[in-house]
Amino acid sequence: MGYRKLNSDDLKEIIYRILCDFADYCDENGLLYSLSGGTLLGAVRHKDFIPWDDDIDVIMPRKDYMKLQQLVKEKPIKDNYRLICYEEHTADFPFGKIIDLNTKVVEKCLTSDEHLWIDLFPVDGMSGDLKEDEKLLNQAKKYKLAYARSVAVFGEGTSRFRAIFKTPLLIYHKMVGKKTYASKLHSLCMKYDYDHSDYVAAIAWAYGPQERLPKTCFENREKKLFRRREFYVMSCWEYYLKSIFGDYMKLPPENKRINHLMDAYVKE
C-alpha cells in the first residue's frame, strides 16, 4: 500500500471530514465546541475555508475537552482517527489534535512529520481583572512564540532573510526545549478554574489579550455554514473576529496570506 500526494482541495476535504465526524461525536455526547480562529473567519467571510488556509481550529471548554479525552478511549470517533494531547502525554504541544492515521504530512518548517489534523484548543478560566488577564495572555503569547521557535527547522522560513535572522533565536529556544514552554503554557491554562470564572480564553495557543471573552457569550452558541453544513460558533463571533482580525471582512494583502508550507499524502 502506497501514498498519493494530495492537492490543496483534497487536503481540505480530508480535514473537513474530520471536523464533520468530530462535530457529530460532540453532538452525540453533549460536548460543547465552537469554530475559532481562521476557521470561524472562513465560515463568516467565505462560508468555507479561507482560500489560502489549510487547517481547522476548534475550541472547547476545558471540562468538555477533558471529557472528550476519556470518551474516545472507550469509543473512538473513527478507527483511523486518534486524539493526541498534552494531558495524555501523546503530544508535546499544550493542546489537542485529532489526526487521521491514513495520512501523513511533511511540514517544511517543523522538525517532525505528522498526520493531517484538526486543532482542539481548550478554553480556560481567567481572573476577571482586565489588567491581570491581559498580563497572563501576553505571557501566554510569548510562550507560544517560544514553543514555535523550539520546533522550527534551521534554514527554513517564509523568506531567506527571516530564515537567517531567526537562527540565533532557534538555537536558544531549542536549548530551553519545547517541553519547558509547553509546561509553562499549561500552568497558565490551569491558573483559574473555568467553572468559577466569568471570563475565559483559549490560553494554550492564544492570539493575545484580545481573545478574552465573557463566558456566557462563548457558551451561548449559534450555527454558521462552513462548506456543506452548519457548525456551532460562539454567539459573540462578531466581537471575537473584530478583536483578533480588525476589519475581518477585508482580505489581507497577499504577503499576509500564509499557509502551513506542507506536503500531505493519503494511503491508497
Image (cartoon, rainbow, N blue to C red):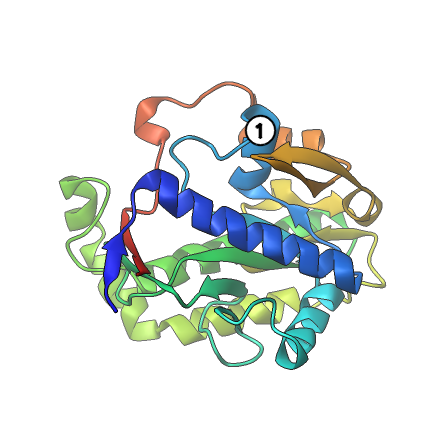
Q: Position of residue 106 (x, y in %)?
A: 26, 59
Image position of 237 with respect to 267: above or below = above
Asked where in the image residue 54 lies, by quadrant, the reply is top left
The N terminus, quarter of image: bottom left
Query: Does residue 97 show up?
Result: yes
Q: Position of residue 160 (x, y in %)?
A: 14, 42
* Residue positioned most to the top: 250
Is 68 left, or right, of 167 in this rendering?
Answer: right
Asked whether 22 or 188 is in front, the reply is 22
Is 194 left, or right, of 80 in this rendering?
Answer: right
Residue at 43% in and 74% down: 180
Residue at 59% in and 35% down: 228
Q: Position of residue 26 (x, y in %)?
A: 71, 59
Is 87 left, or right, of 108 in this rendering?
Answer: right
Q: To which residue does mark 1 refer?
A: 47
Q: Position of residue 175 (x, y in %)?
A: 28, 73
The C terminus, quarter of image: bottom left
Is 267 left, or right, of 65 in this rendering?
Answer: left
Residue at 66% in and 76% down: 75
Image position of 69 with respect to 155: above or below = below
- Tally of marks: 1
Asked where in the image residue 21 lies, by quadrant, the reply is bottom right
Helix, strand or loop under label 1: loop
The amino acid beneath tag 1 is: Lys
Image position of 33 with respect to 147: above or below = above
Residue at 19% in and 39% down: 159
Query: Does residue 125 show up?
Result: no
Asked whether 103 or 69 is in front, the reply is 103
Asked whether 88 or 186 is in front, the reply is 88
Local packing at callout 1 (Cα closer than 10 Å; few below 14, some 14-19, many 20+) is some
